[in-house]
Image: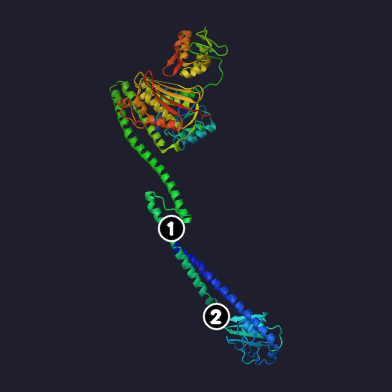
Amino acid sequence: MKLRGRLALVLGLGVVPLAVGAAFVSVALRRAAVENAAAEIALARLEDDRDRCEATPETWPLPRRGRLRRALGLGIDGPRGRRGQRLHAYDASFESRNPEAPPFPPALREALESGDDVASTFDDRQVVVAVRMPWAEGPCAIAVVRRNTIGEPFRWSEALGLPLLVSVLAAGIAIVAAGPTVRRIRRLTAAVRTGAAAGQPVEARGSDEIAELGRAINDDRARIREHVATLERRDTALREYVANTTHDVLLPVSVLSGHLTAVRAAADAGRAPDREVVAGAMSEIEYLTNLVHNLSVAAKLDVGAPLVERHPLDLGTLVERVVARHTPVARQLSIALEHAIPETPLRVRADVTLVEQAIGNLVHNAVRHNRAGGHVAVVLDRSASGFVLSVMDDGPGMTDEELARALERGYRGEEARRRHPRGLGLGLAICRSVVDLHGWTLTLARRPEGGLEVVVRGSIDPG
Amino acid sequence: MLLVEDDEALGQQVVEQLRRAELDVAWLKDGDEARRASLEGLSLVILDLMLPGAYGLDVLRRIRERSDVPVLILSARNDTQDKVRGLALGADDYLGKPFWPEELLARVRARLRRPILSRTDALEVGPIRIDIASRVVTVAGREVELTKTELELLLTLARRAGSAISRQALVDAALDPDRQGTERTLDVHVSRLRKKLGEAGDRLETVWGVGYRLRSGP
């Protein structure tokens, strides 16, 4: 139901009972006033004129002018007043000596017999009020006032008209007055609908409830936009992850298939496979594993810092784990991979998955870009302020330009491209991101003796 | 030891690798079975986290309720929460899939050789013997006279024989910082120590990029 329809319904449901109630109250008050006034007139008149009434009950009351008429404005001037009001006297058995007096109304008789001193009846034409006098003897023990009521609203149905009219008018005014409010709400609705696609804020000027609603909508829309942006970033990262994984995994898998085919051919011929072929196959597997982990970590980093989970970890144990992972491939490639860690645990607060992958990337690069007979060393030491982790090799190293750009995502040095045409250039960029996220530092430098040294410095966990 | 791994091919490979290394291994493929399995006499449990019938961490929790046997977690999920939860629940180590057979064997052997924390009076590495209390060093029974720095160097290396120790760690442990104890003077001390150890001096290996190592094997 529309707002104005609902308003009309509510007003209608509220106003009609109010109007009916008001009519009832009005009629009841009016009847009570008339009854009281008539009773006072009759009492005053009979008390004042008792002697004459009892002396000539057949003709009483004679018309007379009196102060009571003027005071009460009821115009009782005799048996039939100017406004059609008549006064008659009855004895205690409800009989009148005046032959013009109508019979005593049975309903009033019943009321007086039940003990009431005053009783009245109202019908379409007249009001009749009976009043018992303070005395019970004689022909004038009860006075009855009859008054025409034509045109006067003594019935609630007759009194209902005006309150109902006023109420309906008030309801109509309220509905018309609601127009501007309804129009503003419609404008707000249209603004919400059209602005949702464009991301525009809705109008929220003013200080009333509708303006407040507009501001609330704008605030909520901002929150939704932020949430959607996060979801879109995740979605983009996921799609890139899937696309990159599909493309970059299939290539090394093809190379690996070639290596395994060569191994099988050697087995079929009854000879041992070439060492280089086996080493190549292992290298491809290592590359694949590292690639998948890097893409996973890159997707996690692209989403932002909230996904980084820091927990206490022993950096020495983590270095041992990374070295153990790369040792088989290094051995196959005839590269000496050595490491050293402190005797006691070196605890940091870090995301174990990210840090393990970052250090793994440094070792992976040092092994993969080295030559047979080369060396790679991973050294973890305590320092005055925390720890120093150094990964060095005696491979071809980098030029100044390569050093300057090495940490850019997607950048791959000349040597890396020449020796390993595939690769996303993710490894060092991930290292830099992970190191930054943990508040550590990372530096790359050419070793004087040749090769590269990457140094990570950070603080230990005080807890 | 007990392997809990649901993948047929991987489980078979791991079992063969461990048996080739002369290690006795039983294999369970189901998490519920693993929760009920007897842990009596086991020296190690290798536990996959993704199991049918039960989540691996629940199996780990049940194991820890009943035993202190070392547990090595295998997981294909490269997820920090899993690693942290696993270690918090009492796992001793974890190994992400895929892994090289020798990587697995190295981890298994590391877990089987749990460190013995009891005090020892003497360290022996090949023919080299160091009496810690009297600080007397002998090589093949012949006493060798060492300076205080040389003795500290030898002790530091012998305590972790077989592992490379960084130059910085050796400087910190053995050289006096007030007497220009730097990495440059370290090489001089090591050279003298090698000479004093005679033929056993070749056990004191230079490790490229790292520092030195006292070879523990033959």
- Secondary structure beneath label 1: helix
Q: Earlier in the sequence, mark 2 or mark 1?
A: 2
Marker disc for residue A152: 2
Q: How many marks overall?
A: 2
Q: Which residue in the rendered view is the most extreme toward the top?
A: B142
Residue B168 screen position, x and y as percent? 47, 19
- Secondary structure beneath label 2: loop
Judging from the image, mark 1 belongs to the subunit labelled A
B2 or B165, which lies in front? Answer: B165
Question: Circle 1 sits on which residue?
Answer: A185
Tell me if residue A394 comes above or below residue B12 in the rendering.
above
Q: Amino acid at mark 2?
A: Glu
Residue A134 screen position, x and y as percent? 71, 83
Residue B48 screen position, x and y as percent? 44, 32
Q: Amino acid at mark 1?
A: Ile
A142 or B199, which lies in front? Answer: A142
B124 or B68, which lies in front? Answer: B124
From where the camera sits, is residue A128 visible? yes
The N terminus of chain A appears in which quarter of the rendering? bottom left
Q: Residue at coordinates 41% horizontally, 27% vertically from top-left?
A: A360
Around disc 2, counting alpha carbons within 10 Å, would you say few (fewer than 14), some (14 to 19), or many (20 or more)?
some
**Distance between the alpha carbons at the discs numbered 2 and 1:** 48 Å
